[in-house]
Amino acid sequence: MSASNGAAAQTTEESLEARMADKTITLEVFRYDPAAGGDPTFQRYDVPYRSDWVVLDALNWIKDTTDGSLTFRWSCRMGVCGSCGMMVNGLPKLTCSTFLKDYYPDPLRIEPLANFPVQRDLVIEFDGFVEKLKSIKPWLIRNDQRDPADGELRQTPKQLAQYKQYTMCINCMLCYSACPEYAFIPGFIGPAAIALAQRYNLDSRDQGQAERRKLLGVQEAVWECTFVGECSAVCPKHVDPAAAIQQAKVTSTIDWYKRFLMPWGKK
Amino acid sequence: MKQSNEAFWWSLFSAGGVAAALFLPAIVVLTGFVLPFAEGDTATRHEQLRELIGWWPVRVLLMLVISLSFFHCAHRMRHLLMDFGVRSTPLLLAVVFYAGAITGTVATVVVISRL
């Protein structure tokens, strides 16, 4: 590249930067402070538009430069921690992976994840979700007492493939926000918890399937699901919790017929 | 820990979905297009169809496909209404739709048996 060409490219880049600096995008952000009382409101912020900015960058810009009181959760900025889930224009998204350029020049409406109680602004209360995860016994259950000296429990790649997909869940709760059944029935243990149960049920090292199958066979577990499929549609990690629920329904149905046809059988 | 009986209705719904997906298109193509538009005498084709339905495995297959499709429809409609927020009378919904499917099954068995 000649010197003049290099200079021209630099000028073009600078003018692009300059033009970009003038551009703004509007964020309508849900605000709610229970300590202050009153109803939730939406506050409009004009944020500089950058094509490489994600929604989380815009929220951080607001917090750093305009309004330090805006409250939201975030941590890793790379779609791993699952903290920054919010409703973006009515759809549950990880804000660290949702680019402004996909919405520009239209305004964005940012709300806390649907179907959860709001603590403040964009922060939700998720104690109930954690309890649901714990309720399905998400750990390897063994009938024998193993000692590290006994060596590792080995698996073939095929055995690993049975459940690996369900280990990818980052507990971001987008699936709970997307699920219309969860909106109606807060007691429904929901997509991520059932996917987690399947993660252990399908693990060749686990021996707790019988215990978990009883937990999954109750109405508030797999049977509240009507296979709308939105949980899998919004999952940022392609875990496909809807498939996990359908698998659990099949095993639960086999258990039901066994109980019905062989009531004297093993409980 | 009370296990749900929803598994029973779901199994009929599921079987109905499979039966409808596998057999209904073939039945529609056969009876709706192939037979009416095939070459030859209509009366002969009609007799051939009667003869086919007279064979008991075909009767059983037809009964199963139609009956399970009723249960598939009933279960889906019940849950569709629940998805739309009709949740104050769940027992009534279940009784209306599954009774409908059972009535449809009885009617199917009677009609096909008389063919």
Image (cartoon, helix red, strand yellow):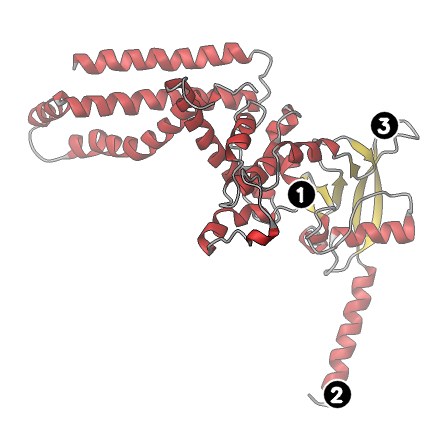
Q: Residues within 10 Å of mark 2 (few under 14, many from 20)?
A: few
Q: Position of residue B106 (x, y in %)?
A: 29, 11
Q: Residue at x 75, y 58 (%)?
A: A53
Q: Are marks 1 and 2 on the same chain?
A: yes
Q: Residue at x 42, y 21 (%)?
A: A259
Q: Quadrant of residue B87?
A: top right
**Badge 1 sits on which subunit?**
A
User: What numbered label is drawn on residue A39?
Assistant: 3
Examine the rendered structure and indicate whether residue A255 appears above or below residue A139.
above
Q: Indicate the amino acid at tag 2.
A: Ser
Q: CA distance from mark 3 to mark 1?
A: 29 Å
Residue A13 seen in this snapshot:
yes
Q: Chain of mark 3?
A: A
| SS under mark 1 | loop
Q: Nearer the viewer, residue B6 or A59?
A: B6
Circle 1 sits on which residue? Answer: A171
The answer to whether A259 appears left or right of A61 in the picture is left
In front: mark 2 or mark 3?
A: 3
Q: Report helix, strand or loop for mark 3.
A: loop
Q: Residue at x 47, y 36 (%)?
A: A247
- The amino acid pointed to by label 1 is Asn
C-alpha gap between disc 2 and disc 3: 60 Å
Q: Position of residue B35 (x, y in %)?
A: 16, 31
Q: Nearer the viewer, mark 3 or mark 1?
A: 1
**How would you rate the neighbour count of disc 3 (Cα within 10 Å): few for under 14, some for 14-19, many for 20 or more?**
few
| C-alpha separation, residue under disc 1 versus residue under disc 2 | 53 Å
